[in-house]
Amino acid sequence: MSESFINIDYIENLLEDAKHSSDELISKALKKAENSEALSHSEVAALLLTENPLHIARIFEIAGKIKKRIYGNRIVMFAPLYVSNFCVNRCAYCSFNHGNDFIRSRLTMDEVREEVKILEMMGHKRLAIEAGESDKECPIDYILECIKTIYDMKFENGAIRRVNVNIAATTTDNYRKLKDAGIGTYILFQETYHEPTYNSVHHAGPKKDFLWHLNAFDRAAEAGIDDVGGGVLFGLANPYFDAMGLLLHNEHLEKKFNTGFHTISVPRLCPASGMNINDFPNLVDDDTFSKITAVLRIAVPFTGMILSTREEHDMRKKLLQYGISQLSAGSCTEVGGYSKRNNKPNPQFIVNDDRSATSIISELMDDGYIPSFCTACYREGRTGDRFMSLAKSGQIGNVCLPNALMTLCEYSMDYGDDTFRQKTNSMLEKEIPHIANETIRIKTMENIEKIQSGNERDFYI
């Protein structure tokens, strides 16, 4: 495939024109966003480029309202599972770079089970498989075996219920195999949509092919995968360019396949082995990063947004207010890292929020959020355009809130101490009345009683 829907001149002209946007234009755009009206490309660019403190304050205010209206106070929890760091690519920003000299490894299936057992003991029900690109050491059959191994595992407190996959761009046939294996979301970061920058940081390997990478989601869609997650690595190129690139990519998928990104990830470039962070001139400061996150929430209100442990505690806490709806917790970014079997660790990137999963989950509740371990939409087929239609109609709240509360209750019974269970009970009493549908509210209360009084688990709507 050779189709490119990213026009560099178009985006750069949008951003240049946006520098001269009038207060009237920006105020109009903000009013439209507040009224749930779609914004034009030029309006989004104007919000990205504004330096007016009053406009920026309004951006955060409206982004917070949108997030609250669509996602409520639910935060979906997950953890990455790194299974291999063999990689044939030479990416300037990544510690897995083929040119870096370190002892590489991939997990055996027994080691996968060991890692997953630890993650399940943390309470996780949703994992994201991560791996470098190597057809020799990490072929698609190995990834499929990892998925099967994870799904086959059963624990006293249940099982991992959904495996998402973040691996390199591949063929339509391989995407079809992933679909048949029952993956949740297929995740792939474009890294940067600015092709000259893309070429400059990808020195060799299959990933150097910009168009092959760019059109990966098209091949995934043709293979039947209707749940995909995009992202860029902010700090490689002009961050405003990449924000616009994400929106254009999302529009391309919506026009061609009737559904865009299920999630957008917003990682920032951070130090890693074998690279010098000072070699990258487009590093994004906290204020700019916060504004971009808020503008993305305004521009794609129904798309989930993911923040990883690249960010420090304070930044993660801040961005939860303005757009982030999914968080990793207790994360490790090295192969075999959860069992600490690697005596010479080489994480893909430095984790800046190294708190335990329990402490992150507990703080979320202290701040009024509902940590959700729900995987119901994948299992009920509420993916792709079906999920988006429910989200845009507002009906998704009738399932998300009950499922979040039931999975939190389950977590508290299986992994929490008495103090945590008391905290959970207080949250249940507060939140259950907010379930609008009476039938669903009654069913939720019945299921919670079963969870608390016995060994019944895995209820969902």
Image (cartoon, rainbow, N blue to C red):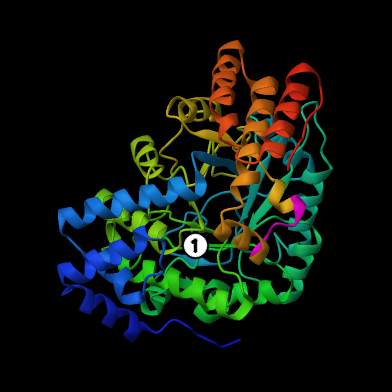
Q: Was residue 157 drawn as part of the magenta stretch in this picture?
A: no
The residue sitting at 82% across, 35% down in the picture is 154
The residue sitting at 43% across, 55% down in the picture is 266
Q: How many residues crowd around disc 1 within 10 Å: few (fewer than 14), some, or many (20 or more)? A: some
Q: Residue furthest top?
A: 418
From this viewpoint, is residue 457 visible? yes
- Which residues lie in the magenta part? 379-384
From the viewer's perspective, tell me whether residue 369 is left or right of residue 414. left
Q: Which quadrant is home to the C terminus?
A: top right
Q: Position of residue 32 (x, y in %)?
A: 34, 65
The residue sitting at 52% across, 40% down in the picture is 75
Hey, which quadrant is residue 374 in on the image? top right
SS at mark 1? loop
Tag 1: amino acid? Gly
Q: In this view, does 124 lie above or below 264?
A: above
From this viewpoint, is residue 348 visible? no
- For disc 1, the marked residue is 99
Q: Where is residue 288 in the image (x, y as percent from the top left)?
A: 26, 55
Q: Nearer the viewer, residue 355 or 380?
A: 380
How many numbered marks are there?
A: 1
Q: Nearer the viewer, residue 34 or 178?
A: 34
Hey, which quadrant is residue 450 in on the image? top right
Q: Position of residue 248 (x, y in %)?
A: 45, 75
Q: Which quadrant is home to the N terminus?
A: bottom right
Q: Nearer the viewer, residue 189 or 270?
A: 189
From the viewer's perspective, tell me whether residue 407 is left or right of residue 232. right
